[in-house]
Image (spheres, grey):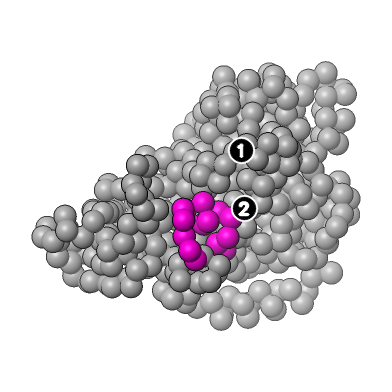
């Protein structure tokens, strides 16, 4: 069999029942944008390729999936730390956005985020912001796979000064990107039930349904939201969305920290997905999402970093470690949501949240060739008794090489798909105007 790229001498994580946690001396072959072969070298002896790469025993893993980010907010990283969500948003973030968000800013700062994500092993991100056209362009140029969602909010917003036009703007964005680029899937991101009227929420969901795209919304992030919604309406934020017919299998509810059994039953019934952002929840003191209960109810849950202003990094390895440990604290149960389950959330589970579980999130023949190679020779990754170590001890800097859609976008920690120095320069120029 002839393929485009054959990577020899890789390690693969062992399967259930294997004696060793890692299988050495394996191969991985790529044809076009798909994995053609992943497995032991002795079964790959008839595979030839245009390009053969010796991986020198690096460990191949599926690329990580970040199910919630506002990439352009890298510009506001560290601008306003240690504040309560309402004050952080209303006194700092919304004014900074009003003064600084421009097409240029979204392009360069999303590209900076793309670099940070690729360098830490993320190959697929769900992004939501203003001027999302520019974010989608940045992801295209960076070679990062993305669900790019145009933001809808009932305020005059960057790029959409008249809120009455927010749905039309989202529809135009979708029409522009649908089917244009295999890397990019357009979507709609309604900011929240407290910044969007009922009519806006329904119209935004209707537009997403009509176009067959995902719909994202921040829900039940802080107790304050319950005061804003539950007091006047007598319904929890999730019940409010259910009553408006917003929930279905293509709706991704972000955060869901303040959800009870009834809310989670509603989300499960509608097969809606959840994205949790543990470090953002910690930093804004939002709370700890009831992840164990979400998983008990068979809800598909992915991990997100949220924007860099509320995290302040975009490294999903850090997010995985913190996610599993936080659940142990919440439940006072050390076996609650084990590392293996969180690894699944950051890979195949995240892809399923983004409606792409059949193409992304695992290393197998026929899946998209989105994968990372990790150097396990670092002291903090030895000895490797099991792959749980990747969750508890690895970090983004252990990722050596990244392939997305069959293309090498980072090699030995150097971004190949674009000029990172130029992006850093442009972001520094933009950052001088902030304040
Ligand atoms: Zn968010």
Residue designated by label 2: 321
Residue 147 can be seen, yes or no: no
Residue 200, compared with residue 188, is above or below; it is above
Q: Residue at x 69, y 78 (%)?
A: 428
Residue situated in front as seen by the camera: 124 or 26: 26
From the viewer's perspective, tell me whether residue 223 is left or right of residue 141: right
Query: In percent of the image, x 57 and y 19: which residue is there?
Result: 269
Asked if residue 35 lies left or right of residue 408, the reply is: left
**Main structural element of the magenta stretch: helix, strand or loop?**
loop
212 is higher (above) or lower (below) than 128: above
Does any portion of residue 364 appear in the rendered image? yes
Residue 144 or 162: which is nearer the viewer?
A: 144
Tell me if residue 5 is in the magenta stretch: no
Q: Residue at x 63, y 80 (%)?
A: 425
Badge 1 element: loop
Res. 143 image quadrant? bottom left
Q: Is residue 394 magenta?
A: yes
Q: Give the percent coordinates (x, y) of residue 189.
A: 62, 42
Question: Pointer 1: what residue?
Answer: 335
Which numbered disc covers residue 249? Answer: none
Which residue shows up at 26% across the image and 48% down it? Answer: 365
Q: Which residues are magenta?
A: 382-395
Give the mark, 2 or 1, whose residue is nearer the N terminus: 2
Determine whether, in the image, residue 290 is placed left or right of residue 320: right
268 shown above or below 416: above
Q: Quadrant of residue 337?
A: top right
Q: Position of residue 411 (x, y in %)?
A: 41, 74
């Amino acid at each position: 069999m002839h393929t485009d790229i054959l990577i020899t001498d890789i390690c693969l994580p062992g399967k259930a029942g294997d004696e060793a946690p890692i299988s050495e001396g394996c191969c991985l072959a790529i044809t076009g944008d798909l994995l053609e072969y992943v497995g032991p070298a002795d079964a790959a002896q008839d595979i030839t390729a245009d390009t053969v790469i010796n991986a020198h025993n690096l460990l191949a893993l599926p690329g990580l999936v970040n199910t919630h980010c506002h990439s352009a907010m890298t510009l506001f990283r560290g601008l306003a730390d240690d504040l309560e969500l309402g004050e952080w948003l209303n006194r700092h973030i919304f004014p900074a956005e009003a003064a600084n968000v421009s097409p240029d800013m979204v392009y360069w700062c999303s590209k900076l985020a793309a670099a940070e994500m690729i360098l830490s092993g993320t190959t697929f991100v769900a992004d939501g912001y203003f001027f999302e056209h520019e974010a989608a362009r940045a992801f295209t140029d960076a070679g990062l796979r993305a669900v790019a969602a145009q933001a809808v909010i009932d305020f005059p917003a960057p790029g959409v000064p008249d809120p009455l036009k927010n749905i039309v703007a989202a529809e135009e964005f979708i029409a522009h990107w649908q089917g244009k680029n295999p890397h990019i899937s357009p979507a709609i991101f309604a900011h929240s039930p407290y910044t969007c009227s009922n009519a806006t929420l329904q119209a935004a969901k209707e537009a997403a349904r009509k176009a067959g795209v995902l719909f994202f919304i921040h829900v039940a992030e802080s107790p304050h939201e319950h005061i804003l919604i539950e007091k006047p309406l007598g319904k929890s934020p999730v019940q409010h969305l259910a009553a408006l017919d917003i929930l279905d299998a293509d709706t991704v509810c972000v955060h869901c920290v303040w959800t009870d059994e009834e809310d989670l039953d509603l989300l499960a019934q509608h097969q809606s997905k959840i994205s949790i952002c543990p470090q953002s929840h910690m930093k804004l003191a939002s709370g700890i999402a009831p992840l164990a209960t979400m998983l008990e109810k068979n809800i598909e849950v992915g991990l997100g970093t949220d924007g860099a202003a509320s995290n302040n990094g975009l490294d999903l390895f850090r997010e995985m470690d913190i996610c599993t440990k936080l659940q142990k604290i919440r439940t006072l149960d050390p076996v609650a949501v084990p590392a293996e389950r969180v690894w699944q959330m950051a890979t195949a589970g995240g892809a399923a949240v983004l409606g792409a579980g059949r193409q992304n999130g695992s290393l197998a023949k026929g899946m998209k060739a989105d994968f990372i190679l990790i150097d396990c020779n670092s002291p903090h990754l030895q000895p490797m008794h099991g792959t749980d170590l990747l969750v508890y001890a690895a970090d983004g800097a252990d990722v050596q090489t990244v392939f997305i859609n069959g293309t090498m976008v980072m090699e030995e920690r150097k971004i190949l798909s674009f000029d990172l120095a130029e992006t850093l320069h442009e972001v520094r120029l933009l950052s001088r105007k902030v304040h």
